[in-house]
Image (cartoon, grey):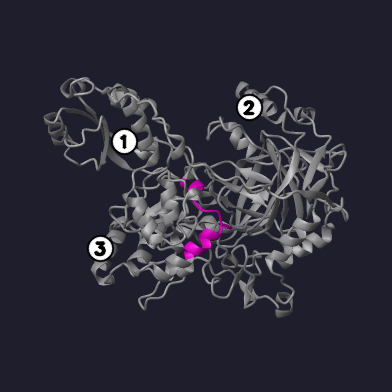
Amino acid sequence: MQRCRPALVVLENVCSAPWEQIKTILQEIDYNGYHMKIDSKNYYLPQTRERGYMICIDQRRLVTEPVEEAKSRKLSAFAQLMKKLERPASSPVTQFLLSHDDIRLHDAVNDISANSNKDRQAVDWTRYKARHLGYRMREGLGDKRPLTKWQENGTCQMPDFYWHGWSRTQTERVWDTLDVNFLRTVARGYDINSKSRVIDLSQGLDRELDQRASGVAGCLTPRGQHFITSRGGPLLGIEALALQGIPIDRLLIGNDSQRDLHDLAGNAMTSTVVGAAIITALTLGYQALPLPTAPCDLDDSELITQQRSIAPNYTMVPLLANIADDNGIPTGELYQLSLRTARLCYCDSHTGTRSDIILTCVACGHTACSKCGKNPPHCYRPVETDELKLRLPPIEFETQVKTRLPMCLQINGLSVDMFQDLREPDMPPDVKHAWDTFIDTIEHSLSNVFKFQGVVRQSSWTITYEGTNSFLKLTCTSIGLQWLLYVIPSKLEPSNSPLRQMLSRPIAKMTPSGNNSFDGTWLIGSPISSQFDLLVAGGGELVDSLPARSGLQHPSFRNLKTWSILHIDAKAEDMKNLEIDIRGAYELLPDCGAASGSLRKRLNSPGSPVYLFLDPTEIGPHQLDSWIFSLEHERLGFGQARNTIAEVRPNWNPLYLSHGQDIVPCWYRKWRETASVALSVYRTSPPPQFFIPGPSL
């Protein structure tokens, strides 16, 4: 600095750096330095990264406030302006992760599975065993390993959705750290596998206590190993770069390993914080910058001119567009095709179709391969070989959808008045305001033209059409096909606003009837839930609950029991408002893998089985999680919302059900049939014409 004398300098270092000493040294060479501590999560990104930042201004160019005076005030001009540029992170870590169908994800998983321990020294478990056992005893967590089921011989069996290739390369210390974190959250009242928590596995048990806000990562370091609990795998190096605000889609990083990218991210500065610091430095010290000089005039001989190339003249030949049939793919054919190409195990991913032994649970219908389907145990039986021979590669479904379904759709007859008819009289002021906001938002979204966007394969197939302010989804599940209409909230809408919660659910839906997948009766949904009371009573036997089965030693958990049967009853008039009558006896299925071992299935259920289970939110306090009634119970991907029949009030738990009959508030959404709404193919008039170059003249 003393030799080059830059007008403005931005410094970044750890908070424990000798900042006061740096200021003194800078003053000796005629620079004023202004310092403050900054956390990255206050500047757009969900990462707790506390660093010190300092701007330095050359006093020979611009005289600024003395450092001593700035120190005497609560906030310096630098700190005040940085505070104005703060914008707390509103998107969770999961929004920065690669999507499940991103090719970079699968390449990265293969990389970390093959090279996970290449640069790590072998760890002797005996060095950590006493420390881990001591922590378990102090916290009353017991000595069981319910999550990883690892053994002293060096084997483990992770839950079926985990990244098994990566998991098997980890050490016993990491496995036991995962188990302790699972037990710790069970004691706190939730299942870590159903929440998107970020745990640094490189830290010891007594240092990484998992007490940050949901959806926020700890400080990224070069040798850190941040584990995403709802993913069952670690934060990748390329994702760590994204959490530093680096635009990964613009980088060519195909030849770099994930370990190298993680090192790069751990040593990098957070771009959003650096950007704010640069803006602040320019705002406060722009007068210290040298004046711009006039551009020099170049001689014509020095100019480089590009030779123009004249393309040959072509005649334009009309191209006959392949217009899809108005009827698309028949309903039965599309349904059968979705079943034959469905993902039957997490290791299938979005492109695989395993042909070896596939298991299906006779209790809940979950499927997995023989390698993954060991944790949770379920009640498996092998799928018949003849049935597996009927499977098709997923590309077959994608090809049929892209070549036979129309590329543009529209919904006719949908109006705001249909939603207004669902309003209830005498609504409280806050509910009335929510209704008005909802109506104003959807008013300009009901006449959108929906254009084909893509096909996604997860636990089921989803075909998406996007409009200007809304989107349309066709879900193909084992239950059947269903069209769902969603409205997109404004980008200016706060992330935790009630409107975003209302619009996270479909506003209209239709189940195809007959042979045409576009024909069916549409249902219009109310954005505000209505309430009724459930009568819940325990029955059957008292069996061990998840805390007791996990071996927690605290007196409140050691012998905690739950009823094997729950009897659900309600008034007949309330059941008329639901899509399906949910009354009946629900049997506990503790080995079928739902959150907190909560899955229950209605006995003797006519038609599709009805499930009752805890459906936690991905981000947020577990006190707001609810038990729901639904026709589906499969694990959802990041950002997905489940279709429910009814929802029990938050924080209700049958573990603490009395021996009598409890009255529990329950919420549901009203749905009303309308015969005037129809889904059809969108046609332009006249039809579009396409031309391609023909022979050259």
Q: Which residue is mark 3?
A: 131
Q: Is residue 435 above or below residue 92?
A: above
Instruction: Report crowding for label 2: few under 14, some 14 to 19, many 20 or more residues within 10 A (C-alpha).
Output: some
Judged by depth in the image, the label closer to the viewer, 1 or 3, is 1
The residue where tag 2 is placed is 434
N-term-proximal mark, 2 vs 3: 3
Disc 2 residue type (three-letter): Ala
User: Gap between marks 2 and 1, in whole Å?
Assistant: 36 Å
Q: Residue at x 22, y 23 (%)?
A: 61
Can you identify the residue that label 1 sits on?
38
Task: Name the spot of residue 683 as percent of width and height, x first.
Answer: 84, 42
Q: Amino acid at mark 1?
A: Ile
Tell me which residue sits at (62%, 68%) in the image. 352
Task: Please give the name of the residue rendered at 69% of the width and 36% of the height, measured from the top-left corner.
Answer: 468
Contact flag, marks 2 and 1 (Cβ < 8 Å): no
Q: Quadrant of residue 289?
A: top left
Determine the residue positioned at 85% across, 58% down.
330
Classify residue 532 as left or right of residue 299. right
Q: Position of residue 597 (x, y in %)?
A: 53, 59
Q: Residue furthest front?
A: 301
Q: Callout 1: 10 Å neighbours few (<14), some, many (20+)?
A: many
Q: Please provide the residue range marked out in magenta.
A: 93-109
Q: Is residue 586 above or below residue 84?
A: below
Q: Secondary structure at mark 1?
A: strand
**Quarter the N terminus occupies:** top left
Query: 91 or 101, which is in the foreground?
Result: 101
- In which quarter of the view is residue 365 placed? bottom right
Q: Does residue 148 show up?
A: no
